[in-house]
Image: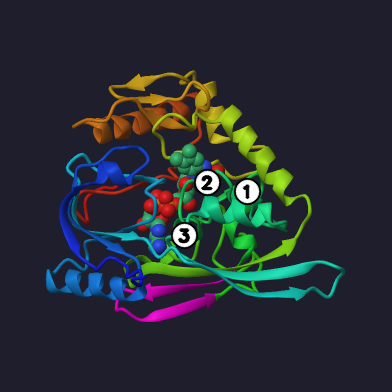
Amino acid sequence: MKAMTPPRFKVERGVPLSGLSTFGIGGPARYLARCRTVSDLRRALDFAQREGLHQNVFVIGKGSNVLFDDRGYDGLVIASELDFCDEISVASTSSNDEEELSLRAGSGYAFNTLGQRLSTAGWGGLEFAAGIPGTVGGAVFMNAGANGFETCEVLACAEYMTSEGELKSLDFREGSCGDSGGSGFAYRTSPFQKMGGDLLAVVSATFSVRSSPGAKARAREYMVRRGQTQPLRDRSAGCVFRNPVGEGMPSAGALIDGAGLKGHSVGTASVSPLHANYLVCRETGAHSARDMRALIEEVRARVREHAGVELTTELKIVPFQAGEDGG
Ligand SMILES: Cc1cc2nc3c(=O)[nH]c(=O)nc-3n(C[C@H](O)[C@H](O)[C@H](O)COP(=O)(O)OP(=O)(O)OC[C@H]3O[C@@H](n4cnc5c(N)ncnc54)[C@H](O)[C@@H]3O)c2cc1C
């Protein structure tokens, strides 16, 4: 039988970004490179440098937390498709009968699959990932979380490529996760967001999870709750706004609902009647991004007027060109 060889690296032109985002919104990318290996990432970087586009590179996973522009992206979009997942070791822990599994996943590996696979096999810690439709790279970059758990809690280290093409890694085994832990992680915040132009892409992540007989049932319960409380059939990017921090602060969804905005629309964009922090795209077309941005601004203004709270976006709004206002 012929050996399976990965598709050859190529750069495509004019690919519609609507097909690469869960919103289904976005005009064409000037260039798109699907990267399945570290060498592909280097080739994409070389291409950007040759074309003078190194300031105009944007990396995506599954596009489940981005809003592209109606005009598209005037640079190189790199789609991270490094989708391997390797077990490194299983060891007993000192405390009791628990075992600890270490595994390394490529940044393009589906985070939902990782959560489901591990919990089904009786490993606990990533049950919350079941139902999050992004990649491992996106989850690390965003410090994705749900049900009171966050990615950084089980992240041992992450490998990344700098904008100079160098491979580096950050070890998180010592620092604790959260605002005061010194690891650089906080609510939907990671040290990678602070690297700005020095980061090209997260390449892989090593997770440590522990044996937990109840993991499968917990993951299933989270999935059922998602189905009941989130508009999963609609085109969305999950929660658009960050929850305000502070003791007793209402969630962003409660604030939007309190301002009477459930079901409110601007053109093709609507506030979901089911979950007010989900803004959904009812129809994809030439002005869908414009409508979504207008709705985001209106929600912000109405919540400011009604509750005196300034909402900020969790969603990454990607401008057509570097330097334009991304929101
Ligand atoms: C139905 C639905 C439910 C959701 N539920 C949740 C939830 O419960 N909790 C939650 O936290 N989020 C949730 N989200 C939002 C989203 O899935 C997460 O933010 C996810 O982590 C994004 O991953 P992604 O691969 O799609 O990243 P993308 O949307 O492609 O990118 C998001 C950001 O990460 C950066 N990025 C992505 N990959 C890399 C990489 N390899 N290297 C460097 N930077 C990278 C991008 O540049 C961008 O800034 C939900 C979204 C949807 C549509």
Magenta highlight on residue 135: no
Q: Nearer the viewer, residue 211 or 161?
A: 211
Residue 242 higher or lower than 291, as above or below: below
Does residue 22 appear to the left or right of 84 in the view shown? left
How far across and how far down the image is residue 299, in percent?
Answer: 41, 28
Who's the residue at 53% across and 56% down the image? 143
Which region of the structure is painted magenta?
Answer: 156-170
Distance Cα–Cα, label 3 vs label 1: 16 Å
- Cβ(mark 1) to ligand 1 < 8 Å? yes
Residue 128 has which mark?
A: 1
- Cβ(mark 2) to ligand 1 < 8 Å? yes
- Rendering quarter of residue 147: top right
Type of residue at label 3?
Answer: Tyr
- Rendering quarter of residue 208: bottom right
Residue 213 visible to the viewer = yes
Who's the residue at 12% across and 69% down the image? 51
Q: Callout 1 environment at 10 Å: few (<14), some (14 to 19), or many (20+)?
A: many
Magenta highlight on residue 162: yes
Residue 109 has which mark?
A: 3
Question: What quarter of the picture does the C terminus occupy?
Answer: top left
Closer to the eye: label 2 or 3? 3
